[in-house]
Image (tube, grey):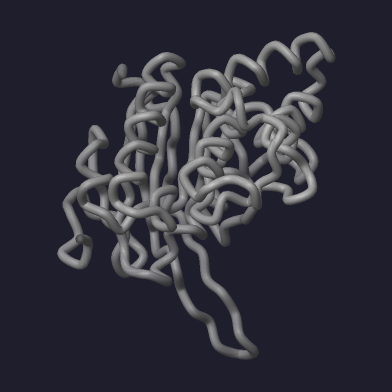
Amino acid sequence: MNDRAFVRLENLQRSYHEGEQSHPVLQGLSLNIGAGETVALLGRSGCGKSTLLNIISGIDTVDSGAVSIDNIDLIGLSEYRRTLFRRRHIGFIYQFFNLIPTLTAAENIALVLELNGFSSAQVQAKTQAILAAVGLGEQQRQFPDQLSGGQQQRVAIARALVHAPSLILADELTGNLDAETGAQIMTLLRELINETGATLLLVTHSLAVANTADRIVTLEDGLLQEREGHFAW
């Protein structure tokens, strides 16, 4: 890790509106994440953690504030440009895997490379390499419903990392797994990220997971605190 701010969030404001009522979620939130740093984000359910990840990835927008990744101003990009940026530079890992059920493990991974314009030979080579790295070479032709939860999460990690993104966003990646499998998944993710030097922001309720990070921050009342949340376990 170095001290250069790779992700910059400045004074983010985000509210949801229901009829005439406004529900603030982020209330002036700011955060810098260094290049290659791993930051764990804690917070109660519904406090805005997933909203924050969606804002960082450009899926969601802010009412006001600034978001930059590697000195690229995401707020100033068109929706199309944000989509391209996300596809090329960000890997997303979800709690419930979000694999396409009609594609095999290898096809789920290859799709990311195809969308990014890699050649057929590159798609084949990179897919095989990442499947081997996550220990699923023999399961590559299996569909998601033929895999265990831990295996599906390995596919999801491989899909998120195969195009060598500079930023990984993980939303409760162990939340749907038993403790032993979750620990194995975290070890695998850290090993792969250490090889690439990617920056990682992971949302979790687990202190065991959070304590693998370089830094822990807690989202509470729309702001971030540099401390552990007392509601984590």
Answer with left or right where residue 109 lies relative to residue 178. Answer: right
The quadrant the C terminus occupies is bottom left
Q: How many marks?
A: 0
Q: Position of residue 203 (x, y in %)?
A: 38, 51
Q: Is residue 149 above or below residue 194?
A: below
Q: Is residue 124 above or below residue 82?
A: above
Q: Residue at x 17, y 51 (%)?
A: 227
The one of 49 and 170 positioned closer to us in this rendering: 170
Q: Position of residue 81 (x, y in %)?
A: 75, 36
The quadrant the N terminus occupies is top left
Answer with left or right where residue 73 lies relative to residue 1. Answer: right
The one of 101 and 31 positioned closer to us in this rendering: 101
The one of 161 and 216 positioned closer to us in this rendering: 161
Q: Position of residue 5 (x, y in %)?
A: 38, 27
- Residue sticking out furthest to the bottom: 20
Where residue 82 sits, quadrant-wise, is top right
Q: Position of residue 186 (x, y in %)?
A: 35, 37
Q: Residue at x 39, y 29 (%)?
A: 188
Answer with left or right where residue 38 lies relative to residue 147. Answer: left
Answer with left or right where residue 148 lies relative to residue 227. Answer: right
Q: Residue at x 76, y 32 (%)?
A: 111
Q: Residue at x 73, y 40 (%)?
A: 83
Q: Is residue 154 above or below residue 195?
A: below
The one of 22 and 143 positioned closer to us in this rendering: 143
Where residue 120 sits, quadrant-wise, is top right
